[in-house]
Image (cartoon, rainbow, N blue to C red):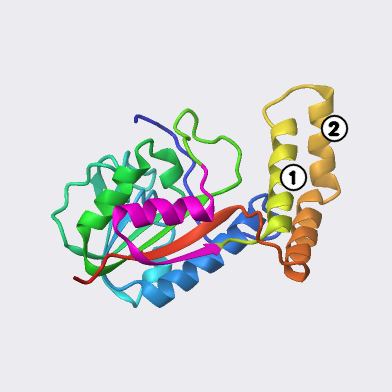
Amino acid sequence: MHVENLERLKSLDVGKSDHNYIVYKFLFADLKQAISANAQGDVLDIGCGNKPYLPFFEGKINSYTGCDIIQSDKQLVDIICPATEIPLPDNTKDTVFTTQVIEHVADHRKLLSEAFRILKPGGCLILSGPMAWEHHEEPYDFFRFTKYGFEYILNETGFTDITITPNGGKWAMVGQLLHNSLRSSCYGKKSTRARVLKGFYYVFRVKWIINTLFAWLDKIDKDYSSTLNFVVVARKPAN
């Protein structure tokens, strides 16, 4: 996989005027909780990019190593390699972390096998991946996962004590996908309709309204039959 100029997450500071507010609101909160409760020792971040989640680990771990398929724009990748061929010895990391990466790996089971191999017995895997999102980083976008899909492939790899947390429910999903649809209709296009949509999107604070409304709906009507992403925690058996 050779991809240049990937859009990299640079900051965890996302306000209600950001079109990705909804997806990040739930993803960041659930990742922070999973890291706080489970991360320890020496950490490997698979698909680390600019290491935006490093602040969540500070004060809890001994070391933080990141690998990725290409160097990030901030030059923060420590090991450049495929997620399926990581040049680290067996049983050397206490925590493996990988977020919004698994859908971009064609052989996603090999990614999980590498995480399992590198983890020490009793070590923890923390990962996230999407259930609902449009194509992105094309053509390297291969899968979407239900909670049952995650449970199956993790069990098949050998992981146990699996916890799967939906990142928001159906209203969060609808609000975020509405943002994505509006943006795809008005950005990168030169038609009159696109210009009108773009003006409406900004002048009438449509982003803020959508973010506020659908985050509120998700709070008062919790329904996790649909979600944007899942955060998964699993362990390599101690024996």
- The residue sitting at 80% across, 60% down in the picture is 213
Q: Is residue 13 visible?
A: no
Dot 2 or dot 1, earlier in sequence: 1
- The residue sitting at 82% across, 38% down in the picture is 199
Q: Which residues are magenta?
A: 144-165
Along the line of sight, the residue nearer the viewer: 200 or 171: 171
* Residue at mark 2: 196
- The residue sitting at 45% across, 42% down in the picture is 103
Residue 61, position in %: x, y?
Answer: 29, 73
Quadrant containing the N terminus in the rendered view: top left
Q: Residues within 10 Å of mark 2 (few under 14, many from 20)?
A: few
Identity of the amino acid at label 1? Leu
Along the line of sight, the residue nearer the viewer: 27 or 66: 27
What element does badge 1 sit on? helix
Does the magenta segment cover residue 151? yes
Circle 2 or circle 1, nearest the eye: 1
Quadrant containing the C terminus in the rendered view: bottom left
Residue 103 placement, left or right of 220: left
The numbered dot on residue 178 is 1
What element does badge 2 sit on? helix
